[in-house]
Amino acid sequence: MTLRFQLTQHAKDEQLLRSLEAYLSCGRYENQKGDWGNFVCTKFADIDAKIIPFFRKYPMSGLKLLNFSD
């Protein structure tokens, strides 16, 4: 089993996903077939040390916050 963080956005937001890659110094951008792209991180150490602290500092709201809390 692998831990995977994935954020999917429309292709017009590719620069946003690439900026996350640069800002967090982890993960990668994956262009999907069609009009979508993903920021993906599968390295546990990066998720634990970079992505989780980012979302604690800048919390989401609504259902996404509940999913994050789980």
Image: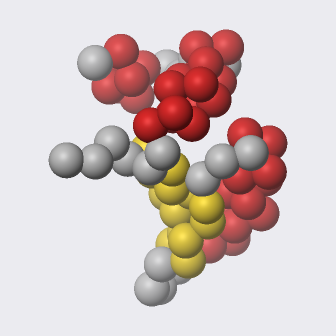
Residue 58 placement: quadrant:
top right
Q: Is residue 55 above or below residue 37?
A: above
Residue found 67% across the figure and 14% down from its top: 57
* Residue 48, placed above or below residue 39: above
Q: Residue farthest to the bottom? A: 33
Q: Residue 2: x percent and y percent?
A: 28, 48
Q: Position of residue 1 (x, y in %)?
A: 19, 47
Residue 20 visible, this orientation: no
Q: Is 21 placed left or right of 6 in the picture?
A: right
Residue projecting furthest to the front: 45
Seen at 80% across and 51% down, the residue is 22
Of the 4 image quadrants, the one containing the C terminus is top left
**Image location (x, y in percent) of residue 17:** 68, 56
| Residue beneath the point at 45% across and 85% down | 33
Residue lying at 62% horizontally and 73% vertically, measured from the top left: 11
In this rendering, the count of numbered labels is: 0
Q: Is residue 45 above or below residue 4?
A: above
Q: Quadrant of residue 69?
A: top left
Left-right relation of 2 to 12: left
Which percent across, then down, holds residue 63? 35, 25
Q: Is residue 24 visible?
A: yes
Q: How is the model colour-coded?
A: secondary structure
> Which one is nearer the viewer's eye here, 1 or 33?
1
Residue, far left: 1
